[in-house]
Image: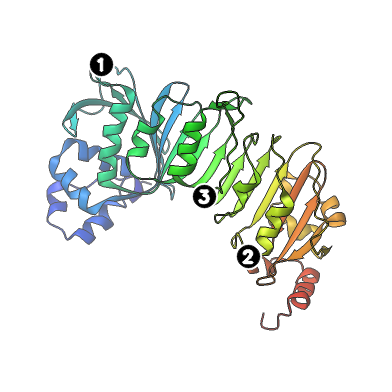
Amino acid sequence: MTTMSNSAPPPIANLLKLPLLQVQNIVRRCDPAEIIASTFLFDAMNELMKKAKLIATDLTYIHKEGVHSLHIDFGHNKGSINIRTGILDDENDLPPTKINGIELKISRTVTGNSREWIIRRPDGFDQEMVLGEMMNHLLQVVKFKNLCFSTSSDLPNLRELPIFQHGTDIGYIQIKKRNQRSVLFTADHLNFLLDEINAKELDLKVKVRKVGDTDFFYEKPFKAQKIELHNVSWVTTKCFLGGDIVSVKLDGETKKEIDYNAIVKYWLNGGHPNLDRFVAQFTNAAVNFGDIKMTPTIFKEDDFSRRNISSYLGSLNDIIKDGKDIRRTTDGLPATLFATTEQVLWCVWHEKYHMFCVPDTFKKLKEVLKITDY
């Protein structure tokens, strides 16, 4: 049975007669790839969609192993489109079309809900230029929740990439190789991404080149809310003393010792009000929370499991046995701390998690927090 989400767009002449709100309701139930393709071919559809606009989750600019591409995620089971440049077969799915005045030929393949569009690169245009023009067009006819960036290497022209020509707000930045090696980055480019770009999420495995003979260290608070770092050689305590961090996962050795005591105290005094969890994995590091007021944890194994804490920390027995509870001085919000020479776990118990605790924990929480109106 064919659903409306897979249907072709109705005749353009019919759409042009309808009020804008009705056009939006119709086209957003059609196959989004077909709607976008129709904007390449018909000027009237292009102008109409500049007003109606499709809705999509993410538009990601990707650079992997020398190949640049775009990835559109429509969300809600509407599939995705991968767009790259390449060599086309003699038979093209779409007739020659113009995007922003540039004549292009596009070949399309479909596998399930995933589509791939290959654009033949015109003479005198490199990958970035073609994808930049495609991105300009997409942003006119599609409203994206997030613009994102993913790369497996540093790029000499990083600042000039099309993704960074459309503002400084980015959904996520991912810098990783397929193998286990870190991506070698210049200090200038990492500073650009962390200082000038406002990313909601960071997922990095980056090693920073020395500046002359000096190791690079980032000495400012991260602006991202979700942070996952798999090389922390350049990370410092100051990275976590500011901003509005929600979750942190660190893995690796630091060249400057991170003062977890100072970070916890920053939270105790009202910083990071939305922090959910902070996990750090390392080897042979000294972590001392001795001057912070703590009590044995009241939380049980099921309380942690229901928050999926065990998925990357292994057994919870040690946490239940040796974990300590702390409370923020500003509002009494509870959290659990657990530290060894190889890891730190810091789990904050916001009110939204209380109702999922086991009955014994819930009862103790009400007593500790002096709650009477649950």
* Residue sticking out furthest to the right: 321
Residue shown at the point (66%, 71%) measured from the top left: 330
The mark closer to the camera, 3 or 1, is 3
Is 101 above or below relative to 19? Answer: above
Q: Amino acid at mark 2?
A: Gly
Q: Earlier in the sequence, mark 3 or mark 1?
A: 1
Residue corresponding to mark 2: 270
Q: Could you say which disc has been placed on residue 279 in the image?
A: none
The mark closer to the camera, 2 or 1, is 2
Viewer can see residue 8: no
Is 116 above or below relative to 77? Answer: above
Q: Is residue 14 left or right of residue 245?
A: left
Mark 3, other Cα within 10 Å: few <14 / some 14–19 / many ≥20: many
Residue corresponding to mark 3: 223
Tell whether label 2 touches label 3 (CB within 8 Å): no
Q: Earlier in the sequence, mark 3 or mark 2?
A: 3
Q: Earlier in the sequence, mark 2 or mark 1?
A: 1
Q: Amino acid at mark 1?
A: Asp
Q: Circle 2 — which element?
A: loop
Q: Is residue 15 left or right of residue 28?
A: left
Residue shown at the point (66%, 59%) measured from the top left: 266
Q: Nearer the viewer, residue 74 or 85?
A: 85
Is 330 above or below relative to 341? Answer: below
* Residue sticking out furthest to the front: 213
Viewer can see residue 341: yes
Q: Is residue 312 left or right of residue 213?
A: right
Q: How many marks?
A: 3
Mark 1, other Cα within 10 Å: few <14 / some 14–19 / many ≥20: few
Residue shown at the point (79%, 47%) measured from the top left: 287
Q: Could you say which disc has been placed on residue 90 in the image?
A: 1
Mark 2, other Cα within 10 Å: few <14 / some 14–19 / many ≥20: few
Tell whether label 1 touches label 3 (CB within 8 Å): no
